[in-house]
Image: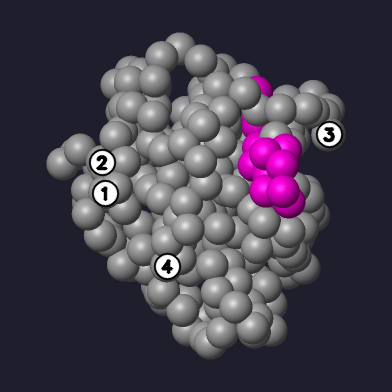
């Protein structure tokens, strides 16, 4: 696909690990993870998406649940799609016409220290309603990757022009592959291995399924304000929004 189709945003934890080879998969986002006292643990995915998106969310949930350390369960949405405000202890997944703001999909995590406390995923129908992105392959690729980010995974590769690695955690201009090029619609073995590494230890507390909520103002602050730039080069930028009291939102942006 053409270069101008490479609009994408991932809002997740700080730390970029760009790989030169899929054989050396190391794509944890700075060690950020859900706190839990046992494996496997379960992450609820709040379904705030339209019926068009439901099958893609279902496939992504099933794919990530193949991990030996975590499962996902699709539950009723706890947010409005337009703002996709997070719910403590789980991930809200939304779609909507968010406007011509430059991003196709985003994933966002709130952290306390190194622990993920809640997450939100958005797919921007302003772009998905155009001919460039209105396809099953683009929808599956984006929702799979953004949900994967909320577990603490980074990308395996960030070059849109490289050969597909066969994982949704790989940037691509051709998500469905073909002609000998694998599709990037699902996780691969390296993603599952990386989850095993991230969640190899246990914690003495849990942030999964917790009920303590951040103030609504703190959640709203992250909707439009990414905070300060902590890393930037070319089309990559990492932002950090400090909410105080060891709570932060880390935002990773790929600009068009």
Q: Of the residues tagged 1 and 4, which is closer to the observer?
A: 4
Q: 223 and 72: which one is in front? A: 223
- Residue 31 at x, y = what percent? 74, 64
Question: Can the viewer see residue 176?
Answer: no
Element carrying mark 4: loop
**Residue interval drawn in magenta:** 242-255
Principal SS element in the magenta part? strand
Element carrying mark 2: loop
Q: Which numbered disc, 3 or 1, marks the residue that appears first in the sequence?
A: 1
| Magenta-drawn stretch contains 252 | yes
Q: Residue at x 35, y 57 (%)?
A: 45
Q: Which numbered disc, 1 or 4, marks the residue that appears first in the sequence?
A: 1
Q: Of the residues tagged 4 and 3, which is closer to the observer?
A: 4
Q: Which residue is mark 2?
A: 49
Q: Residue at x 57, y 31 (%)?
A: 222
Quadrant of image for the C terminus: top right
Q: 172 and 114: which one is in front? A: 114
Q: Which numbered disc, 2 or 1, marks the residue that appears first in the sequence?
A: 2
Disc 4 and disc 3: Cα gap in Å? 32 Å
Disc 4 and disc 2: Cα gap in Å? 21 Å
- Are the two marked residues, 1 and 4, in contact with CB atoms closer than 8 angstroms? no
Element carrying mark 1: loop
Q: How is the image coloured?
A: one colour
Q: Which residue is mark 4?
A: 209
Question: Can the viewer see residue 23?
Answer: yes
Q: Which residue is mark 1?
A: 77
Q: Which residue is mark 3?
A: 231
Element carrying mark 3: strand
Disc 2 and disc 1: Cα gap in Å? 8 Å
Disc 3 and disc 1: Cα gap in Å? 33 Å
- Are the two marked residues, 2 and 3, in contact with CB atoms closer than 8 angstroms? no
| Magenta-drawn stretch contains 46 | no
């Amino acid at each position: 696909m053409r270069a101008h189709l490479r609009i994408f945003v991932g809002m997740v934890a700080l730390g970029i690990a760009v790989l030169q080879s899929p054989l050396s998969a190391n794509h944890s986002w700075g060690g950020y993870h859900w706190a839990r006292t046992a494996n496997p643990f379960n992450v609820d995915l709040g379904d705030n998406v339209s019926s068009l998106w439901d099958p893609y969310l279902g496939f992504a949930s099933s794919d990530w649940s193949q991990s030996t350390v975590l499962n996902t369960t699709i539950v009723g949405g706890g947010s409005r799609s337009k703002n996709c405000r997070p719910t403590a202890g789980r991930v809200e997944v939304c779609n909507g016409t968010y406007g011509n703001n430059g991003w196709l999909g985003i994933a966002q995590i709130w952290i306390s220290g190194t622990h993920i406390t809640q997450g939100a995923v958005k797919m921007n129908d302003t772009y998905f309603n155009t001919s460039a992105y209105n396809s099953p392959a683009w929808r599956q690729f984006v929702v799979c990757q953004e949900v994967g980010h909320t577990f603490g995974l980074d990308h395996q590769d960030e070059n849109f022009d490289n050969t597909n690695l066969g994982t949704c955690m790989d940037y691509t201009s051709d998500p469905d592959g073909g002609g000998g090029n694998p599709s990037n619609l699902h996780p691969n073995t390296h993603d599952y291995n990386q989850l095993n590494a991230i969640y190899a230890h246990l914690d003495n507390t849990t942030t999964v399924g917790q009920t303590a909520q951040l103030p609504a103002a703190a959640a709203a602050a992250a909707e439009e304000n990414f905070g300060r730039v902590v890393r930037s080069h070319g089309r990559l930028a990492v932002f950090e929004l400090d909410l105080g009291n060891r709570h932060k939102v880390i935002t990773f942006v790929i600009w068009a």
